[in-house]
Image (spheres, helix red, strand yellow):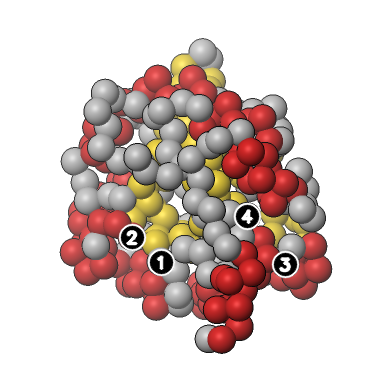
């Protein structure tokens, strides 16, 4: 049986890290703020993966973003996935060359899946995370792209079937309506997943406390949970949540922290 995972997501906007609520962004602080409030060399022992997304609304300074990605790859021993605004093979390649283990694609999944095939041909399907953002309006769930600004006509189940046919390693299933609320995940989205869906599912959007992780991970359709809330899990919040999950017998990876730190210092 595959281990369940806990993932921390950072939202980046032109040098700052953001809180998001229903995809409306609020600046929290820059990299110096993040260093003061999160010791990533220690947090890495509380998470299984780090995701860094460039959610910049205006013109992107891609090189500056790559520099931030490189910082985290030097600080964290866990796998790092990164994305935001990827439209070309070259952009995906630059993230990999900056140290990311995986790339996160969103709009490409709907508008240009052939680029995903090109990325997989170069780096392998295991390094591609397909992200879909789902929002509820007028009692109907819709797919939104371009940072939640463009509503797509394709249905959720149809898109998931398309994803299943592509060389994709993971699905990041994100709720716009629950994003940043801290009220828990929108588990109803899981009902759109086709039977025998072959790709691991990361559920995102809405986590605010330990019980939200636990409730989601109890569902066999969920392989991992993600949170992007910088305040709800500040300090020892992620460590305490992981310890509680382990105490409650969830199938998470267990590390010898002292040994891992010793080996990291030897590198």
242 sits to left or right of 153: right
Mark 3 or mark 2, earlier in chain: 3
Q: In the picture provided, is 190 more to the left or to the right than 225? A: left
Mark 4 highlights which residue? 46
Spatial CA span between label 4 and label 2: 22 Å
Question: Are the residues flagged by discs 4 and 1 in contact, CB closer than 8 Å?
Answer: no
Residue assigned mark 1: 101
Real-space Cα distance between discs 3 and 4?
11 Å
Seen from the viewer's position, the closer of residues 254 and 6 is 254
Res 61 → quadrant: bottom right
Q: Is residue 220 left or right of residue 154?
A: right
Q: Earlier in the sequence, mark 3 or mark 4?
A: 3
Q: Position of residue 45 (x, y in %)?
A: 61, 60
- Image height check: is 72 above or below 180? below
Cα gap from disc 4 to disc 1, whole angstroms:
18 Å
Determine the CA span between mark 2 and mark 1.
Answer: 6 Å
Dot 1: what SS?
Answer: loop
Q: Quadrant of the N terminus?
A: top left
Q: Nearer the viewer, mark 3 or mark 4?
A: 4
Question: In the image, which is nearer the foreground, mark 1 or mark 3?
Answer: 3
SS at mark 3 in the image: loop
Q: CA–CA distance between discs 3 and 2?
A: 26 Å
Tell which circle, 1 or 3, labels the residue nearer the N-terminal end: 3
| Residue corresponding to mark 2 | 127
Q: Which residue is mark 3?
A: 39
Report crowding for label 3: few under 14, some 14 to 19, many 20 or more residues within 10 A (C-alpha).
some
**Of circles 4 and 1, which is in front?**
4
Other-residue count near label 1 (Cα within 10 Å), few / some / many at <14 / 14–19 / ≥20: some
Q: Are marks 2 and 1 in contact (CB under 8 Å)?
A: yes
Near mark 2 (Cα within 10 A), the count class, few <14, some 14-19 or many ≥20, is some
Earlier residue among tags 4 and 1: 4
């Amino acid at each position: 049986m595959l281990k369940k995972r806990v993932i921390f997501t950072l939202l980046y906007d032109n040098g700052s890290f953001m809180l998001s609520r229903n995809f409306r962004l609020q600046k929290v602080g820059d990299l110096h703020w993040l260093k003061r409030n999160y010791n990533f060399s220690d947090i890495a022992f509380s998470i299984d993966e780090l995701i860094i997304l460039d959610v910049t609304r205006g013109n992107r300074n891609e090189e500056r973003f790559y520099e931030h990605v490189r910082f985290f790859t030097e600080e964290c021993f866990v796998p790092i996935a990164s994305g935001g605004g990827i439209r070309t093979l070259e952009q995906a390649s630059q993230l990999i060359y900056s140290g990311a283990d995986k790339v996160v694609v969103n709009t490409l999944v709907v508008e240009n899946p052939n680029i995903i095939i090109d990325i997989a041909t170069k780096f392998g399907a295991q390094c591609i995370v397909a992200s879909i953002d789902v929002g509820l309006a007028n009692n109907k769930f819709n797919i939104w792209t371009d940072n939640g600004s463009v509503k797509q006509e394709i249905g959720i189940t149809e898109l998931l079937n398309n994803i299943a046919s592509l060389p994709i390693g993971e699905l990041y299933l994100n709720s716009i309506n629950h994003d940043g609320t801290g009220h828990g995940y929108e588990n109803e989205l899981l009902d759109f997943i086709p039977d025998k869906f072959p790709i691991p599912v990361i559920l995102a959007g809405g986590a605010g406390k330990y019980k939200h992780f636990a409730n989601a991970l109890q569902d066999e359709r969920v392989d991992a949970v993600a949170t992007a809330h910088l305040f709800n899990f500040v300090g020892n919040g992620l460590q305490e949540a992981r310890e509680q999950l382990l105490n409650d017998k969830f199938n998470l990876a267990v590390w010898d922290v002292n040994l891992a730190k010793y080996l990291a210092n030897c590198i």
